[in-house]
Image (cartoon, rainbow, N blue to C red):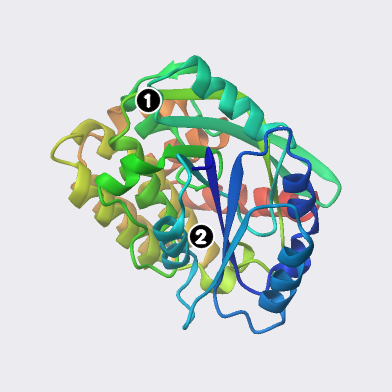
Amino acid sequence: MPKFSIIIPCYNSFKFMNKSLENFENQTFNDFELVIIDDCSKDDSYEKLLEYRKNSKLDIKLFKNNTNLGPGETRNVGLKNAIGEFVLFVDADDYLETTALEKIHNVLNENNNCDCVLYDYYYKSNKNEYYKKTVSKNISGNISKRDALIYTTGTTLGKVYLLDNIRKNNIKFPNFKRNEDMPFNKIAISVCEEIYYLKEPLYFYVKNNESIMNNIKIINYENANNAFNFVESKLKQKFPYEVEAIFIVEFLYSSTMTLMERRDKTIEIKKHIEECEKRYPNLYENEVIENLPKHQKICIKLIKKKKILLLRFLQYLRNWIRKNR
């Protein structure tokens, strides 16, 4: 059994995988397998992966979906076929730092009961790199489940889970075409008992304009709504306060900014905010707001005051900065 299974969904992605595969070849810890699932690529990615596997020293398991399933269900195929002790996810156009697995392994060796490791990442845009935190609160080392649930990003990057824990709790990515990662990660964290936050960037998230994550055409309010409803149905009874905090970050904030991206009318955005306030009447009293990154904190305070024009300006300014990085 390898120590790590690294699950990589692939859709027309082989052309972006050079750096990722190179860094896997050069990992300082090599007890791992790559579980790559081609999600019905329309180009020759699957054939190129077959060819690469023949000449690689890496332990590569390669699968091909019969129909296009989307990233969540494709990762579920990976979870079903992985045999490692721990599992982590890497997107095809991203890559790990070459000492990443060694550093994660060292954490696990020093914390025998650890069933989840969190770590930071770099956001790469053009030639620039920006350090990003996976946990927004200023903490590190062994952290509580409560803090992990509230302050950890919903994306798959920056997280390692004990695979047996995922399987025995039957945790899977929900069958959503978008926003499937947040429910998976929040629910996976909820069943972990010892969580360690390694406050060090080990992952490179690469901005790819062809990626669905950067395609404004697929931005959909309903995706965020479905994702949060899924989390609420699974966790609210046991973690009511934490679910309210997740609602603030992953729904109130994210869906309001989505409506900004869609350029919805001000009256519709105000109506959405009011509906959120009815759903969780005490949400502005939740401590999560004061521990959020500065931009999010400012936006939520403007949301509370219904300052939609200011929010639009901030969104425009942030998008302009991202575009010109």
Q: Where in the figure is residue 131, as x and y percent of width and height?
A: 69, 33
What residue is shown at x 82% (from left), y 43% (from top)? 128
The alpha-carbon separation of the residues under discs 2 and 1 comes to: 29 Å
N-terminal label among 2 and 1: 1
* Occupied quadrant, residue 76: bottom left
The answer to whether 257 is drawn above or below residue 113 in the figure is: below
The answer to whether 187 is drawn above or below residue 309 in the figure is: above
Q: Would residue 247 be seen by someone viewing this image from the given angle?
A: no
Residues at marks 2 and 1 touching, judged by CB atoms closer than 8 Å: no
Q: Nearer the viewer, mark 2 or mark 1?
A: 1
What residue is shown at x 67% (from left), y 39% (from top)? 30
Q: Where in the figure is residue 88, as x and y percent of width and height?
A: 52, 45
* Occupied quadrant, residue 13: bottom right
Q: Is residue 146 left or right of residue 75?
A: left
Q: Is residue 168 left or right of residue 207?
A: left
Give SS at disc 1.
Answer: helix
Q: Where in the figure is residue 265, as x and y percent of width and height?
A: 44, 67
The answer to whether 260 is drawn above or below residue 109 in the figure is: below
Give SS at disc 2.
Answer: helix
Q: Nearer the viewer, residue 224 or 192?
A: 192
Q: Which numbered tag is attached to residue 25? A: none
What residue is disc 2 on?
A: 260
Residue type at mark 2: give it: Met
Q: Residues within 10 Å of mark 2 (few under 14, many from 20)?
A: some
Q: Residues within 10 Å of mark 1 (few under 14, many from 20)?
A: some
Q: Nearer the viewer, residue 240 or 285?
A: 240
Of all residues, the one furthest to the left in this rendering is 237
Q: Which numbered tag is attached to residue 147? A: 1
What residue is shown at x 65% (from left), y 59% (from top)? 92
